[in-house]
């Protein structure tokens, strides 16, 4: 059995908040250029029809709600 008495000589490790498995490339917030490019990308996606319309979003919510009801009914069996 190994004793832990000799390990008390090293300073305690400080807890550093880490996201994911590896360290992030950067923790800096977005620059003005980043924000502008994000807005341009979003506009392109909307113009290309790659976002769902309000009607599609409502229909999706209705379908998911109905699926939830069916699953709930099977849980009662």
Image (tube, rainbow, N blue to C red):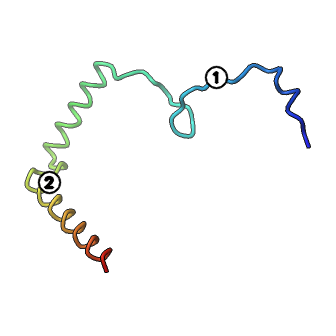
Instruction: Provide residue 64's location: percent of width, then percent of height.
Output: 21, 63
Please tell me whether mark 1 or mark 2 is closer to you in this view. Answer: 1
Residue 26 against residue 65 in the figure, above or below: above
Q: Residue furthest right?
A: 1
Examine the image and state in which quarter residue 4 appears: top right
Front residue (pair 35, 20) = 20
Residue designated by label 2: 57
**Mark 2, secondary structure of its residue:** helix
Residue 72 picture quarter: bottom left
Q: x%, y% of residue 73?
A: 25, 75
Q: Quadrant of the N terminus?
A: top right
Q: Is residue 29 left or right of residue 56?
A: right
Judge the density around disc 1: few (<14), some (14-19), many (≥20) Cα neighbours within 10 Å.
few
Question: Residue placed at 33% from the left, 19% from the top?
Answer: 31
Q: Position of residue 47 (x, y in %)?
A: 13, 43
Q: CA distance from mark 1 to mark 2?
A: 46 Å
**Between disc 1 and disc 2, whose residue precedes?**
1
- Locate residue 26 relative to residue 36 in the image: left or right: right
Q: In the image shown, does 45 or 77 lie closer to the viewer?
A: 77
Quadrant hosting residue 30:
top left
Please, which residue is most extreme toward the front here? Answer: 76
Q: Which residue is mark 1?
A: 14
Q: Are marks 1 and 2 in contact (CB under 8 Å)?
A: no
Q: Residues within 10 Å of mark 2 (few under 14, many from 20)?
A: few
Q: Judge whether 47 appears above or below 27 on screen.
A: below
Q: Report helix, strand or loop for mark 1.
A: loop
76, 43: nearer the viewer: 76
Work out whether 72 lies above or below 44.
Answer: below
Q: Residue at x 19, y 49 (%)?
A: 50
Residue at point 68%, 24% (across, down): 13
């Amino acid at each position: 059995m190994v004793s832990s008495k000799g390990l008390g000589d090293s300073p305690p490790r400080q807890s550093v908040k880490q996201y994911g498995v590896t360290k992030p490339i950067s923790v800096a917030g977005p620059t003005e250029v980043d924000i502008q490019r994000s807005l341009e990308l979003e506009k392109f996606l909307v113009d290309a029809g790659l976002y769902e319309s309000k009607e599609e979003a409502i229909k999706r919510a209705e379908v998911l709600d109905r699926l939830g009801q069916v699953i709930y009914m099977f849980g009662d069996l």
